Structures are given as structure tokens and as C-alpha cells.
Amino acid sequence: MKAALRVCQRAAALLLVAAATAAVSAATATTSIAAAQTSAAVALPKVALPVTREVTLPNGTRLILAEKHDVPLISFQGYLRGGSVTDPPGKEGVASLTAEMLRKGAGRRSAREIAAATDGVGASLVTGAGTEASFISGDFMARDTALMLDLLRSILREPAFPDSELVKLRQQTIEALRAQKDDPLSMLSQYAAVFFYEDHPYGRPVSGDEETVGRLTRADVLAAYRANYGGDRLILSMVGDFDARSMEAKLKSAFGEWSRAASPLPSLPPPIRRAGRRILLVDKPDATQTYFWLGNLGVAQTDPDRVPIDVVNTAFGGRFTSMLNTALRIQSGLSYSARSRMSRLTLPGTVAIVSYSKLESTQKAIDLALVTLGTLHASGLDEQTLRSATRYIAGQYPIGFETGGQLAGQLLQLAFYGLPRTEVTEYPARIANVRSPRELLPLIQRVYPSEKDLTIVVIGNAKTVRPVLQRYGTVVETSIQEPLLSAVRRVRSAAR
């Protein structure tokens, strides 16, 4: 989602190895280095979650409260289950617009007064939506607890949705959607989702497009709010300088009487893995590079093999020295970046190779990406790559648990996906236990698509790129100037 539903688990790490002094013999030095390497391999980072007070109110609201008194700050993050999967057909973007409008007037405060109240105490307050949830987050000084709770309650329970603010926000959203087309890399995943998922709710772009947003009215926003906002949808995680029992009482007062959302959550069908090759070309005549997405259906957030999948994806395309980036950037210079991206949701999302190259090297870059995927399928990971990937992940994992906001986010993710605390606390040990390259090969073949079963989405100069893409299969084509949804649906229908 724009700002939430993801867990930060990857960055750069260093393995520290002790060296022998010049006075020690070469044999002793070798032994010392080997011992240091062994020690580094088994030294696991310690990650602890704070003690929490967790309460489910009679209306279904779930509270997760953790005291953290080292700084006088309170951080909170909340999800309301729903998101863009609840957008009615033809009204894509309404969940996002509704969430953004929460701060545009609520209770006794106007949009300007909400902003002034927040900025005046140096706080932050953000609302938005993603694929499976709308969200609210913020950071306030502990001394401003009363203001924080008043804003939180009024924004969620008493939004005004003034038409004057809606008109402005709708136009700003349309302008932002049009401006985004100048950044093909940011558009690539949106085109891929609409083309790959077809009519599945995961294929609804969170922000909609300029056509669907332009049709949205205040009545649409009110209907979306009434259908999808209520006590039964809210999970609120709060970490900071407060007494948990006292905060529980205050939050009960604020949200305990909030009625349930008017509509049940939609029951989503499982997405479909696509057989064969399907190719979408999005023409951007002024493009000087070709941006490509090669993917298929991957796994869900709660997949039982999620830990070894993290290791494989890190080694394949999740760090600078990954297989993909080594092949396409470091060794060949065909691209500045090549990644393997996984969208892991409640149901399986996509797994894809994402990269870009100069127009004239488009074929070489795509061919090399396919060769690298084939190598992963045929040979998996060697022992050195596997060890390096596990150390890489473990080395930086604790960085995601330093601030109150990070802890609130981690606790919220666990609650949203129904995962236990051990998902976090035992993660380093589980990563370290991924030791057998041979055992990973069946998992790789299950999770990563073969070269023959790929959805290919490309943004670039069609005149130059079209002949290249025709080598890989039948190409359907649209223009980046057209509204995203209607354009992709039109070419998809024409190809049937």
C-alpha cells in the first residue's frame, strides 16, 4: 500500500572477522580466522518485542499497547481492513480518496485546523489506503496525548467530507496521476497488476486512474466510508511513553461505542497462476529506456516456506550483489538496477523481475534476465551464496525494531496477518537454519515461474521495442497517455 502492509527486513551488513597479529605464526593465524568466521556464523542478532497489553473490545476493535519510556513520544499505527479491494467496479480509487479525506475536516475542526493542531505541536498524522487496508499513523509527544486521542477519534469516527475539500483533493489526485506517467518505473507495477490479475480485486490500482477518480463524488466517498469504516475493522497498535492500563481506558472511551461497518469484508477468490506468455507493451514515445516486468503468481504473506523464500529472494534479486543485479548491472552494465520483487498479501501476490535498460539494449537485458531466471530454476543457490544471503538478512534485521513507530508497525503486521510474536523473535534463528541448497530447489521451482510461463509488461518507445518483444510472443499494445484501467482492459478484451 502507499504507506503500509509491508515489513522491512533487508539492507547491507558487514561480517567482522578477527585477524591474527604479525607475531603469530601463519598456521595460528589461519586457525584464528576460521574460528572467528565460525563464531560470526552462529552469532545471531537478538530481537525482542516489548511486552504488550492486547484487548479486543466488544465491537471488534483490537488494541495493542506497549510501553516504551526511553523518550517522551507516542507512536501509533492502525489498519482498517478493506482498502482498494472494496472499490466498486468503475469507482476504483474511492478507498484511497476516502482515506485521504479523513484529514480534510472532522468533528469541530476544518482541514486547516487539523493541520494547524498537528503541526503546532510538532506531531505527524497520516492517513491513506493500500490494497487490503486503509491506514492511519502518527507520532505525538507524550504531553500531547489528549490532543492525539481527540484527533484520532474525530478523524476516524466524525469525518465531515466537505465537498469543497473533495473537489480540491480530487483534482490534485488527477494531476498527480498524470504526472506519475513521467516516471515509468513507478507506473510499471500498476500496469502489471491490472494486466496480470485481470478482474481480480488485486488488480484494482489503489489510486484508481484519472478517469475513475474524475467520476467520484461526495456520495461515493460517504458510501465507501459507511460500508468500510467501523469498530470491527480497526486494529490499532500504539507504542510509547504511557501507562498501558490508562491508555486502554482512554481508547475504550474513544472507540468502544463505534458501530460496526455497514458491509461485510469481501470474500476474495484465489488469484490464478498464468500459463504461457502474455505480453503488454505500453507506448511512451519519448522514453529513452525500456522498463520491464517479468512475473507470475507468487506466494502469500503467511506461506509456510516464507523464511527460506526470504533467503532465496535476497540471493536472487534482493540486494546489490544478487544474481540479477550482478548479471544485469555489475558484469554486463546493461542496467542500473535489477530486482526480484514479491507482493505478499493475504492471498498470493506476484513475484517478478523488474529492471530497465537503454532502448538499444532491451533485447540483451531481457534475454539475460531470462537466462538468470533459468539458472535459478536449474541450479538453485550454491553454498557460498546461501551463507552470504543468510548473513546479509540477519545482519540488518534488528534495524527494523529500534523506534516506537517501527515497533508499532511490526506489532500491527503480526496482528493483521494473524502471526505469533515468534515470527519476529525467532526469525534470525530460522534464517540461520536455512542451510541446504539442495532443499531449496523444490521451493524455487514452486515459487518462481519458469521462462515459459511469464506475464511480460514493458513501458518504452513502441516503435523501437515492438520488434524485440515479438520475439517472445504475441504483443498487445496501449499508450501511456490513456487512462490506465480502460486502456489495459480494452487491449485485454481485444486479445481474447
Image (cartoon, rainbow, N blue to C red):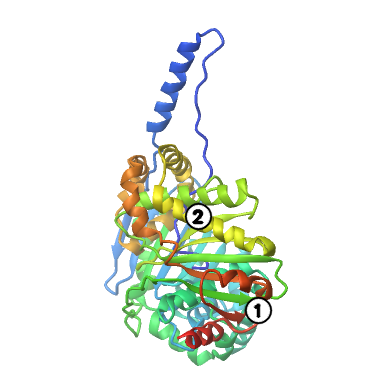
Q: Is residue 432 left or right of residue 76?
A: left
Q: Nearer the viewer, residue 410 or 206?
A: 206
Task: Name the disc covering residue 178, or none.
Answer: 1
Residue 129's label in the rendered image is none
Q: Which of the 4 image quadrants contains residue 156?
A: bottom left
Q: Nearer the viewer, residue 7 or 321?
A: 321
Amino acid residing under circle 2:
Val
**What is the secondary structure assignment of the residue under circle 2?**
helix
As drawn, 31 above or below 164 = above
**Is residue 100 visible in this depiction of the protein?**
yes
* Amino acid type at image mark 1: Arg
Residue 155 at least partly seen? no
Where residue 183 sits, quadrant-wise, is: bottom right
Given residues 34 and 412, the one toward you in this image is 34
Q: Measuring from the top left, give residue 402's x and y in whole percent.
A: 48, 46
**Residue under numbered circle 2:** 371
Foreground: 31 or 209? 31
Q: Which quadrant does the C terminus fall into?
A: bottom left
The residues bearing labels 2 and 1 have C-alpha atoms spaced at a distance of 35 Å
What x and y, as percent, mark residue 268?
33, 77
At horizontal 51% and vertical 73% (from top left) the residue drawn is: 473
- In the picture shown, does residue 98 fall above or below 236? below
The residue under the point 29% across, 75% down is: 59
Crowd around label 1: few <14 · some 14–19 · many ≥20 (10 Å) = some
Secondary structure found at label 1: helix
